[in-house]
Image (cartoon, coloured by chain):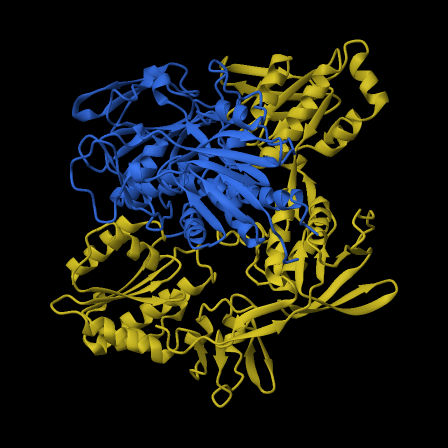
Chain colours: A yellow, B blue
Amino acid sequence: MMAETTNTIDVTINKDVLVIGCGTQGLEAAEAVAAKGYKVVLVDDADLPAPAANAIEVMANTKVESLAGLAGDFRTCLANGSGRSERTFGAVVVAPRYGLAPLNEAYGLALNDKVVTMTQMEALLDDGAFKETLVQGEGKSIAFLSGFGQEGDPAATSRVLEAALTVQQAGNSRAYVYANNVKVGARGLERLFTQGRNEGVVCFKPLEKPAIEQGDTLKIVINDPVVREDVELEPDYIVVEEAVVAGPENLAFAEILRIDTDLDGFIPSNNVHRFPANSNREGIFVASQPADAANVALRVAELLDNGVRTVAKNAAVVDENKCTICLTCYRCCPHGAIFWENGIAAISPVACQGCGICASECPMDAIQIGDFTDEALTADIQEAVASVSGTPSIVAFCCQNSALEAGEAAKAFDAELPQGFRMVQVPCAGKVDVEFIMKAFVEGADGVMVAACHEGNCKAERGNTFAKWRVEEIQKRLETIGLSKDRLIFTTIASNMAEEFSMKVRMFAEQL
Amino acid sequence: MNSQSGKVMVVGGGIAGLTAAWELARQNVSVELVEKSCFLGGHSIGYTCKATDTCQQCGACNVEKMLKNVVGEPLINVRLRTEVSSLDRSKGFKVSLKKSSDDMAEGLILKGFSRHNSPLHVKGKGVTDEAPEGALGIEEMGSEGEIDVDAVILATGFTPFDAELKGTYGYGKWENVITGLEFENIVRENAGIVRPSDGKRPEKVAFIQCVGSRDERLGNLWCSEVCCPYAMRMAGTIKHDNPDAEVSIFYIDVQNTGKEFPVYYEKIRENVRFVRTIPVDIYPIENDSLKLRHMAEDEGSPSFEEFDMVVLSVGIMPGADSKTVSETFDTPLTVDGFLDDSVDSGVFVAGTAAGPGTIAGSMAGAGKIAFDAVKYLGGAK
């Protein structure tokens, strides 16, 4: 496997950190990173409160216009009223601020002084004059709507429960909660929910969205599933829930920073390997949850350390005689680790994660990956097939993040594996070239298996997808040359699933 | 930035303890990791991958990865089958260690869930059968003596709810009534779901949520946060492996799985039936199958339904030894009986020892605790 002696080089990297977005998480992340000894520049396109730590330089009303470069050397253009400035940073932290959108339309309601948003009600409950009206005379009846305009989450539920309890405790007023799924899945919420009910908050859980009339008075009608009849209420106020939305700047950050979002448009993408603070690009971190700030600081410190990073010289090497700067590698690199200089593609050894997708996709075969050069892998394939006597011989290209672990565990725990089964370690299924698969058949393998991470679990985001495409392509070729396409399969497996791996291999062997 | 010194003891080798230890080591702090059982990984190392063809973000594979990290890290010294017997805080933290009881393995050959466990097998007291190669005898394991450290992180974990306390469900009496935790282990070890009674694939499966959680009568006023996610993911796995299977989830309120939940929930509802009620009781019928009685919201009268297998989504309870841990380390308990993680005195609490949490949440929390602990050591500058 070790084709060449690994040579390392020391790369000097910039130690300053840019934090974009100054909500609670942004501020906390800036302070945590500063506490680790790094200089922080905190920018936001709005006004900013002054942070406590003096290692933080604050730039209010400032936009990040562009970001180029890579981990250890991000070059940004920051723009504000006094002009533009070019600044270089070793790492970037993005802490997007989210907006709240009232969901009154989902209930067919128009906002007015009686139909208010959750934010407005929270403000009213902080207002002495309003609170007085809750105490006087018969007080007020206030209905909260939760979970019919959106699925909701514990944060939203927490706001409803807190406000309802405040209303109920005010004196003569009554709080009603119309809830779908009560999201109590966070610390203390079940207790808060119970306390509210014990103090008189009425919670209805109708099966359908409540029907609401909005005229001179307000009227809510539901069919109560417990008493099994219609229940009407004419509340003084209706409080509508709010959705957390990714603001347009969230997507703008993603685009400028070249990082992936999840299905809802929130960064980072939904991948367990990124959790909690990493994005798909080395050196760009995301703080969005309360524990993220500390984790961001840990990852920043790990990357920047004392400003010198020792990296493998041969992590990914571009052959200048072969590269035609077609930019295939630039486009397919999931880590944004490739740029071009001096007429050829260049791969940052700091940002490169060694997945090898670029090397497999390069139409000129101009890229070689560290310990997984074409020469080394070809030798591994030859050895794998040659070491088998008897049939069927199976060569399995195993991603070292998942299938290889599962396969090694299967061996360690004596799970049943066919005699002729051999694993070839690859850094990511995305490094399994068409040539390697064909080579295995040429060497005499009866079957070839490409074993990758499950979709959405690939450390290189799309390495498994590339591998799957290539397998499908070769299956077609096998058929055209008169071989059964069933001699080649693509499968996905997790690192902890030894028995499942063993079962999959045995089924393949039987099929052969 | 790179000159940290000091030593931290991490108590508990589950996902929170492993992550805390690893994150301390990344900051150049040496770690004494003490685990009372014979293996690292805690509950979560036994969890199964719940991917269909697509990753469902359960985080079980992260535990495997973290265990691998920890055993390969020279700054972390792992002490298995070891407990803390006392703590002397008169000068720093002087921790006395003792071997934990060897009763846990009496007559058994224990097996680790991960190939990164060392040893993979442990031979318990009184075992005469030949153990697999490399197995250690339990009597060879465990540490004693005193160690001086500069801070302590308690990651002593949770105890799953004892489903036998819900007598009407017949757990422990009817073989095919199992807990969610057992479901995890069965799938992991059999590469698919099978019934304990006959090893056959069940065609009709019920999940009952909130077994032990959100239960005022038991005084358990918390949501365990993980059970809706695991039940939904496992239901999805069953349907993926066997599209003809019928899966029902009986629930009070559906809790979220994390990112992208609305999309996920909408999709799973196409394949899995959700019934908003908590069943009353379960009776055995022929073929080791089960009859479940419930009061469905939209029906208004009791109805009976038959299942091949019933999974009880048992919740996260305070660790069985949380009281002892609280006394030993002079760390208060919360009103719910978990360790109080809000006290900042050099003894930190990470993971489910402090309350319910997912793998992802425990890992993020442990990272934060490792950060806070280093700050406490005075080295975070």
Res. A144 in view: no
Check the image and name the residue furthest to the left: A390
Please state the horizontal and vertical placement of residue A128, each as a whole percent of the image. Answer: 85, 22
User: Horizontal placement of A71 versus A171: left or right?
Assistant: left
Q: Is residue A438 above or below residue B133?
A: below
Q: Say left or right for A147 vs B206.
A: right
Residue that lies at the very extreme toward the right in this rendered image:
A82
Of residues A256 and A7, the one drawn nearer to the viewer in this rendering: A7
How many numbered discs?
0
Residue at x 33%, y 59% (from the top left corner) = A404
Please tell me which residue lies in front, B204 or A327: A327
Q: Residue B347: x, y in percent? A: 59, 34
In the rendered image of this protein, does residue B236 appear above or below residue A453? Answer: above
Residue A135 visible in image: yes
Image quarter in which the C terminus of chain A is found: bottom left
Looking at this view, name the residue that lies furthest to the bottom: A321
Camera-side residue of B138 and A99: B138
Q: Quadrant of residue B142?
A: top left
Q: Where is residue A60 shown, x and y percent of the image?
A: 82, 55
Residue B342 falls in which quadrant of the image?
top right
Coordinates of residue B2 in the picture (x, y in percent):
63, 58
In the rendered image, the vertical position of residue A472 relative to residue A125, given as above or below = below
- Quadrant in the picture for the N terminus of chain A: bottom left
Determine whether, in the image, residue A28 is placed left or right of residue B284.
right
